[in-house]
Amino acid sequence: MWKTKNSLNSEILKYFLIFSIFILGILWFFQIIFFNSFYRTQKTNDIQVVADKIKRNEANENLEEVINDLAFDKGVCIEITNNNYDLLYGSTYFGKGCISSIEKTYQYKFDFINNGKKEETYELTNPKFNNNTLVHALKLKNNQYVFINTSLEPVDGIVPLIRKELIVITGISFLLSFILAYFISNHIAKPIKEMGEEAGKLAKGNYKVEFDENNKILELKELSSILNLTKNELQKTEELRRDLMANVSHDLKTPLTMIKAYAEMSKDLHQDNKEKQEEDMNIIIQETDRLTILVNDILELSKMESIEENLSLEKFDLIELIDTIIARYNVLNELEKYTFKFIHKESSIQIKADKKRLEQVIYNLLNNAINYTGEDNLVTIKVTKKESIIVEIIDTGKGIKKEDIPYIWDKYYKNKKKHKRNLIGTGLGLSIVKKILEEHHFTYGVKTKKEKGTTFYFEIPKEED
């Protein structure tokens, strides 16, 4: 488990160990470098606290009791003498390292009793333990003298004890680091590892994988949710790619087959019939034009999706643009008896947009309506000017199923995967429309009724006067 270099498990263990070493290093550093200094400061403060309390209680009948309590609480030794150096009282607590009255170290007592001061502090060397000792002398009102003393060095074995404890704590800390790292890494690393394995399957094209979103860790739960969403989008993209390949192949194959067939017919059967040869050539030209439209649509969509082009905004007349586009379909009026009905109240509507791109939108929506309109071959273009300018392209076909509406803007989406050869244009038109309208930030959509036809629309915000 820990052998894999740079794995999450080993990284968690590493940081736990670094943290433990850092904390323990601080403890050892303070114990070795600052312990004596800290001990000295604490004992100095303890002696001052004891002296202050004795001064406040010197008239107390129970002074001896107070002295004993203070001696035990602060770990100091307390003696009371007269000016003849006779010991009047000694605390029952006499800690290791204190200067005893039985030792011949009266010089500091002699100095204090004779210098007339009320309070004095001495730092001496205890001859018995050879340790530094702090003595605080205090003169009471009844000509009695209090001597409070304590060792400034830990001489009672506390340092070795602390060091032993630190060694035990160090061992326990490292052991806990391993245990905690193991459980935490299992709790975090295991689901991440499982995600990685599932993601590997996804990368190989297996879209049946599922990322568990029930993880208690919020970030892992969110990551699972994002990966599931990514999987669904990749699956959808893969399906669209397959459909696109199948449909483009179909649209390429049909005109190529017809071009080849009519070329062979013209060569083998109609060599002497100029009229038939001309018909053959016209069909070949029409199919070539269809191939050109398909290739141009694929290139246009690829170009629009690969780079973000800047829109070339300009003011122009929307009504005039639509009239120009409809005029291009006169050949369909003559050949297929298609009727184009243009409804508008205003004779002119000025808008600001990319004229070339908006022309593509209207052109592709008209092509779509021509391919799916009803038996009456009627296509209606309606422009309404209200709070915004609404452009509608209406056919009279069978309509679109409700469940199919969210997908009609996808490249080459076909209901139930059935591909129909378009009369005009390619199956990429609505994808191009969607891309251009979104670049303009225009609202767009579709309304449809079964057997009543379909209306594609988009809204252009009015220019402020």
Image: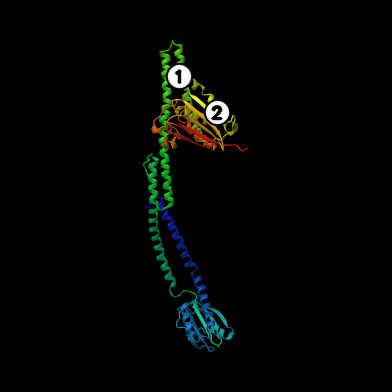
Q: Nearer the viewer, residue 197 or 294?
A: 294
Q: Residue at x 39, y 51 (%)?
A: 215
Color scheme of the displayed model: rainbow
Q: Is residue 129 visible?
A: no
Q: Nearer the viewer, residue 220 or 402?
A: 402
Query: Where residue 273 sits: x, y (%)?
Result: 44, 11
Above or below, comparing residue 65 to residue 354 in the picture: below
Label 2 vs label 1, nearer the camera: 2
Q: Are marks 2 and 1 in contact (CB under 8 Å)?
A: no
Q: Residues within 10 Å of mark 2 (few under 14, many from 20)?
A: some
Residue 248 in which image quadrant: top left
Query: Where residue 365 sits: x, y (%)?
Result: 49, 30
Q: Nearer the viewer, residue 139 or 419?
A: 419
Q: Is residue 388 visible?
A: yes
Image quarter hosting the C terminus: top right
Q: CA distance from mark 2 to mark 1?
A: 28 Å
With 384 as the anchor, is 421 left or right in this view?
left
On residue 335, the disc is none
Q: Which residue is mark 1?
A: 283
Above or below, comparing residue 453 to residue 101 in the picture: above
Which three-letter amino acid code belongs to the residue tagged 2? Ile
Q: Secondary structure at mark 2?
A: helix
Q: Which residue is mark 2?
A: 322
Query: Where residue 391 sits: x, y (%)?
Result: 53, 33
Q: Residue at x 49, y 20 (%)?
A: 334
Above or below, comparing residue 149 to residue 19 in the picture: below
Which three-letter amino acid code belongs to the residue tagged 1? Ile
